Image: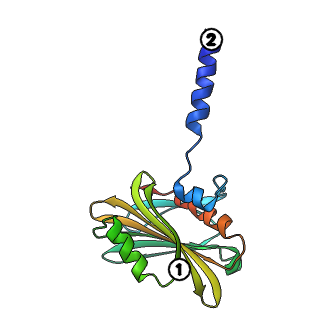
Amino acid sequence: MKFKVSILLLFLITFTSCAKKTLLEQTINCSGSASINNSKVYKDIKKNFTIKIPKDWKTQFYYDNYQSDISSADTTKQLTKTFILNTSSKQGELILDRNFESTIKSKNKYEIINSQFENILNKPSYWYIAKGKKNNFEYQNLNLFIQTSVDTYLEIKTEVYGNENINERLCKAISIIKTIEFI
């Protein structure tokens, strides 16, 4: 009997500890969570969310009446070896539907290569990945909209410059995004 209970317990621990990948992670081929070592928890100025960012990254804050931003980048690396992450909590109604998607696609100046509606951080979300040229660099960006309440949402933008290790950098950005907690 103890053996059966032990097997069942082992199965439950194994099954529940394996976090299911989001469609976004599957699309980019993230093999697992990229480790974020030596990080610090930052809280946005309006106290809407926290995010863990590596301590040695340059991090800036911005706010006005309608939004509160945390922008970060690893300035110890060349632009083509890292990424820029901007996380904004915004006030305003966000309706994540096909009309929203059509508006995004019609206003985007870059080529959208993938997009999807799904739940991220247990909230209704929409993301898209676009590519093009910016400042004479090959450029990809991941834009993620997460509805946090009826009249607030997060807009997260990850900018990746150059052609090297794009998926690896996007996966690291997603690992950082997954540390977000709502206050």
Q: With 160 as the anchor, is 123 left or right in this view? A: left
Residue 152 point in image, percent of width and height: 32, 65
Residue 135 point in image, percent of width and height: 60, 90
All told, the count of numbered labels is: 2
82 w.r.t. 174: above or below:
below
Residue drawn at (57%, 28%), measured in percent from left and top? 12
Whether residue 172 appears in this view of the structure is: yes
Q: Nearer the viewer, residue 118 or 47?
A: 118
Mark 2 and mark 1: Cα distance apart in space: 58 Å
Residue 169 point in image, percent of width and height: 65, 67
Residue drawn at (71%, 75%), measured in percent from left and top? 81
| Residue for badge 2 | 2
Quadrant (top left, top right, bottom left, bottom right) of the C terminus:
bottom left
Quarter of the view holding residue 160: bottom right
Q: SS of the residue at dot 1?
A: strand
| In this rendering, the label closer to the viewer, 2 or 1 | 1
Q: What amino acid is found at the position of numbered circle 1 in the picture?
A: Glu
Quadrant (top left, top right, bottom left, bottom right) of the N terminus:
top right
| Sequence-first disc among 2 and 1 | 2
Q: Nearer the viewer, residue 43 or 104?
A: 104
| Residue for badge 1 | 111
Taking the view exactly as shown, the residue that stands out farthest to the bottom is 136
Residue drawn at (56%, 44%), measured in percent from left and top? 19
Q: What amino acid is found at the position of numbered circle 2 in the picture?
A: Lys
13 w.r.t. 63: above or below:
above
120 w.r.t. 113: above or below:
above
Pointer 2 local density, CA inside 10 Å: few below 14, some 14–19, many at least 20: few
